[in-house]
Amino acid sequence: MEEVVKLLLPFLSTPKDYAQVLKKLASFAFYETYLITLLLRANPRFDTFFAGIESWGPIGKVAGIVPHHEVLNLFGVVIAFAVAVLTHMFQFHDRISDIFGIRRRFDCKSILIPLSQRVGSVVTEDKEVKIGKHRDELMRTVFYKYASSRADMPLVDKHDIEHALNAWSWFWAFVEAVVYFGVGAIIAWWVGSHGLAGIFAITSAAVLIIAFVQRTRLGRYARPQIDSIAANPTAAADVKCQFDAL
């Protein structure tokens, strides 16, 4: 029952691991896509196209069973579900991050370099370049090794890990929403609903601003995790060896 509530009400859920983050993003994708398709149906061309699919052959017979199906935007539900599945399957936020280097910059500037300095490994310009080059490997060996949400007893306090996951889940939800409403704006403009296109564009811009604000808060959730790793003599020595070996 708890899992169902998390899927239906993603804004109320606090993810405890990365899998739950993906589910939360998929839920947001479903609702946002459904809303966009519902509003697009205000355009006669769009509504006619959707209605034609909903009333076609066997699909129409199945849809007819649903009470008030003519106002429920059933084809919009199908599209929203497909987007949610694809978002989860291909980890859409990661693809956006890869394009704009979001996670790469954060990992280097807010985690790896500060952690290296905390454990006493000197960070030169050359080492910064090497840290960026070996970012994925270093994140596994010096950070996630001690701050994994999947570990039963991680070195880092689980509450700190969960707070960071929750903050990132909201950030990625905002980032993905920018894309969804941006695409909605393009489609609305293409079908001649310029007013609706403007609404979608403004929404996309507003969510982008919120995403930037949320981005400024993410560093504070990494600091307690870095402090925990650096405060443990065994972990700190191991981490220092990893950085000194670069």
Image (cartoon, rainbow, N blue to C red):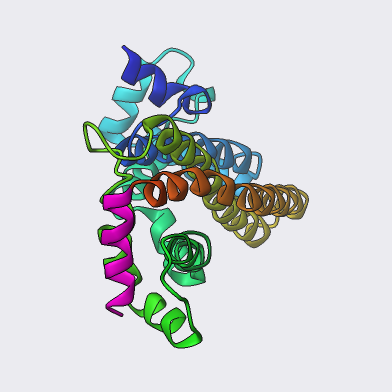
Between 166 and 151, the one nearer to me in the picture: 151
Q: Is residue 118 above or below residue 33?
A: below
Q: Quadrant of residue 8?
A: top left
Q: Position of residue 123 (x, y in %)?
A: 47, 77
Q: Main secondary structure of the magenta part?
A: helix
Magenta stretch bounds: 233-246
Q: Residue at x 49, y 48 (%)?
A: 222
Locate residue 213 relative to residue 237 in the image: left or right: right
Query: Where, quadrant-wise, is the C terminus in this rendering?
Result: bottom left
Judging depth in this view, the residue of 124 and 54 nearest the camera is 124
- Above or below for 105 versus 61: below
Name the residue rendered at 74%, 47% in the picture: 199
**Residue nearest the observer in this picture, 51 or 160:** 160
Furthest residue in direction bottom, as rendered: 126
* Up-down relation of residue 129 to residue 44 (above or below): below
Q: In the displayed structure, would residue 21 be above or below residue 105?
A: above
